[in-house]
Image (spheres, coloured by chain):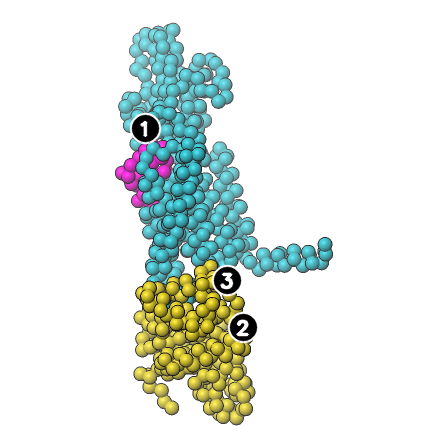
């Protein structure tokens, strides 16, 4: 299926980014369709986080072009993007409610909207009991849910999730993926990075990433079929071998 | 006690330091800089003399100029003193008020002709700096003792009257009154620098800064928010220091309190941004703490608290002019000791505002660079 630029939430072409001698992005090309959940799957150091930071406007690629929600990444589209960092980027001494209020205000929400969305999000993510506890008293999983809530408080059109399921138990991981699917139902585009191959089946489409570039994109089924593999992991390894890396 | 476990822990600490080159560098550089500064300041080499005005008496037949001239000659030979002839007492007083002279020493003779002897001596100083007043008064007392042929008892300045022209009354302020402006400044600077730099380092290491930078917030909004957030706490601290110094230690506050806070707020605004900018040079809280002596001690030594700025080696005088604490201490001395108003300390407030604006520019640049 051919992607038209107008249908793409993110349109990246031939991105390159080098840090010292490391090529973090090396001809990275990917189109993310509006309203889909796209999983970036690849090993550590593949370039997933670098790409997500380029989409968030936190770094400028050395070469190539990138459009996010039809604009150059940065201030122009920042208010329409939600960014969940790899570690729980929250203020430890503040409660979940206070963190949500702070990030909501940063995104320009008024007090009553922040209040209403806080109530809705904590119910949705089932952290109502913890909403007034300081973040430093929460378990790792609860912190990740609070982290996700802060990324969603301004109801972004594009949600960037950097390794959201690292270090959390299977039950919570299941809940998180259910929330991502729920978001998709609201028309939100979700870009999620992971190195857990089993999570590929939960995405609408998956992009295999290695050595700073996209090896293949498709549904998990398509990727398996194209590689003649029975699992996503085998398909990924076959692709890497074929790519000579 | 298990030697192997203790050894493993010791080795771990040594290895951590070995890998943390910046901390290692600071451990070496900071004491070298601070000790070199102290070594110079407590030594005698390169010091500039205090400038003292004297009114040369008219020499008339049968007059009483001889003992006064002998006194002025002895005064000119005191270490750390440079005597300058002024045409009249009024001109000398004007020089003291304007700051072109550190002091004016007025001597009178008693008697006439061959029986004339050295009479009362008056030392005129601004009265704002005990480090200026004491050496001038001591030099005058020892020169007078030589002329009179008496020995000077340590701590005693016989026949020396001190006139403090910048103070509302001629009463010598207490030691705590002299120290209070510097105490408020040091606390304000130290508290703000420490908390801002550590807070911002945490903001970076916890990922919240990255999250903020991905949001629509602008660099100048982050800095303004930080500045507004710290000002109330720095003000509360200043209020505590000021309250304790005045109510418990009876330090003098001759001028308006709001001016004390105006000085402090300008200092805090610059310091918040200095803390933010320097926190980007640190990776750990240990490294941030290492910056404290580097940014604080030179300012404490060069702000005129311990040594008059005018007597420092000229390059150090220039450095002191670049440091905000110099202006804050001077302005607070003027307000608290001399009862100065807004106009009298306007130049110091402007200097502090320039420091704050320069630091805001540095902080903004550093934050903007993080977005690319």
User: At 45% from the left edge and 69% from the top edge, which residue is drawn?
Assistant: A128
Chain rendered cyan: B
Query: Residue visible at 36% across and 73% down?
Result: A155
Q: Colour of chain A?
A: yellow
Q: Is residue B289 left or right of residue A1?
A: right
Check if mark 2's residue and mark 1's residue have beta carbons within 8 Å: no
| Proximity of marks 3 and 2: CB atoms separated by less than 8 Å | no
Query: Which of B211 and A125 lies nearest the eye of the viewer?
Result: A125
**What's the mark number on residue A136?**
3
Q: Secondary structure at mark 3?
A: helix
Q: Which residue, given by chain and number where applicable, does mark 1 sit on?
A: B168
Q: Which residue is label 2 attached to?
A: A167
Indicate the position of residue B171 as horizontal and vertical percent values: 37, 25
For residue B22: magenta? Answer: no
Please check whether the numbered discs 2 and 1 fall on a single chain: no
Q: Mark 3 or 2 closer to N-term?
A: 3
Q: Does residue A13 appear in this view?
A: no
Q: Quadrant of the N terminus of chain B?
A: bottom right
| Alpha carbon separation for disc pair 3 and 2 | 17 Å
Q: Is residue B25 above or below residue B95?
A: below
CA distance for labels 1 and 3: 55 Å
What's drawn in magenta, residue-wise? B330-352
| Pointer 1 and pointer 3 on the same chain | no
Q: Within the magenta stretch, is there residue B338?
A: yes
Circle 1 marks a residue in which chain? B
Residue B229 visible in the shown view: yes
Residue at 39% across / 81% down in the picture? A184
CA distance for labels 2 and 1:
69 Å
Quadrant holding the C terminus of chain B: bottom left
Which numbered mark, 2 or 1, is in the foreground of this view? 2
- Secondary structure predominantly adopted by residues drawn in magenta: helix
Which residue occupies 45% across, 80% down?
A: A178
């Amino acid at each position: 299926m051919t992607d038209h630029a107008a249908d793409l939430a993110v349109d990246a072409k031939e991105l390159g980014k080098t840090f010292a001698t490391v090529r973090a992005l090396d001809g990275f090309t990917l189109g993310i369709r509006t309203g889909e959940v796209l999983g970036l799957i690849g090993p550590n150091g593949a370039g997933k986080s670098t790409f997500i930071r380029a989409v968030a406007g936190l770094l400028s690629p050395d070469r190539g072009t990138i459009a996010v929600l039809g604009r150059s990444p940065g201030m122009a589209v920042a208010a329409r993007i939600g960014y969940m960092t790899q570690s729980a980027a929250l203020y430890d001494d503040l409660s979940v409610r206070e963190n949500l209020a702070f990030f909501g205000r940063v995104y320009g929400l008024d007090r009553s909207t922040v209040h209403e969305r806080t109530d809705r999000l904590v119910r949705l993510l089932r952290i109502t009991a913890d909403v007034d506890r300081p973040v430093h008293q929460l378990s790792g999983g609860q912190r990740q849910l609070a982290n996700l809530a802060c990324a969603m408080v301004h109801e972004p059109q594009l949600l960037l999730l950097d390794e959201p399921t690292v270090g959390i138990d299977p039950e919570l991981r299941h809940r998180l993926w259910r929330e991502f699917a729920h978001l998709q139902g609201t028309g939100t585009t979700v870009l999620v990075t992971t190195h857990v191959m089993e999570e590929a089946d939960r995405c609408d489409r998956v992009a295999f990433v290695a050595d700073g570039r996209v090896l293949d994109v498709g549904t998990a089924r398509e990727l398996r079929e194209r590689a003649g593999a029975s699992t996503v992991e085998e398909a990924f390894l076959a692709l890497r071998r074929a790519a000579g890396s | 006690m298990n030697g192997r476990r203790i050894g493993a822990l010791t080795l771990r600490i040594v290895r951590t330091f070995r890998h943390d080159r910046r901390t290692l560098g600071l451990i070496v550089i900071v004491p070298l800089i601070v000790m070199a500064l102290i070594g110079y300041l407590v030594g005698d080499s390169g010091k500039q003399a205090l400038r003292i005005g004297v009114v040369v008496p008219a020499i008339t037949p049968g007059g009483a100029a001889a003992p006064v001239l002998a006194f002025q000659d002895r005064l000119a030979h005191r270490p750390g003193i440079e005597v300058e002839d002024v045409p009249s007492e009024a001109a000398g007083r004007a020089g003291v008020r304007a700051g072109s002279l550190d002091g004016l020493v007025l001597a009178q003779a008693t008697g006439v002709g061959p029986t004339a002897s050295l009479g009362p001596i008056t030392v005129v100083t601004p009265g704002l700096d005990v480090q200026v007043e004491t050496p001038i008064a001591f030099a005058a007392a020892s020169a007078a003792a030589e002329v009179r042929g008496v020995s000077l008892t340590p701590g005693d300045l016989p026949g020396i009257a001190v006139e403090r022209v910048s103070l509302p009354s001629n009463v010598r302020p207490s030691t705590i009154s002299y120290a209070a402006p510097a105490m408020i400044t040091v606390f304000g600077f130290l508290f703000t620098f420490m908390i801002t730099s550590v807070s911002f380092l945490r903001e970076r290491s916890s990922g919240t800064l990255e999250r903020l930078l991905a949001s629509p917030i602008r660099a100048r909004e982050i800095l303004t928010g930080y500045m507004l957030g710290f000002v109330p706490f720095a003000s509360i601290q200043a209020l505590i220091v000021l309250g304790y110094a005045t109510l418990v230690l009876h330090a003098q506050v001759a001028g308006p309190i709001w001016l004390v806070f105006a000085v402090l707020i300008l200092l805090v605004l610059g310091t918040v941004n200095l803390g933010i900018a320097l926190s980007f040079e640190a990776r750990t809280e240990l490294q941030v703490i290492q910056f404290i002596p580097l940014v604080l001690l030179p300012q404490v030594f060069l702000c005129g608290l311990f040594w008059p700025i005018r007597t420092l080696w000229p390059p150090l005088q220039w450095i002191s002019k670049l440091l905000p604490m110099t202006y804050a201490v001077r302005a607070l001395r003027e307000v608290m000791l001399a009862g100065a108003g807004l106009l009298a300390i306007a130049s110091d407030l402007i200097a502090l505002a320039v420091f704050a604006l320069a630091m805001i520019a540095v902080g903004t640049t550093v934050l903007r660079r993080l977005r690319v």
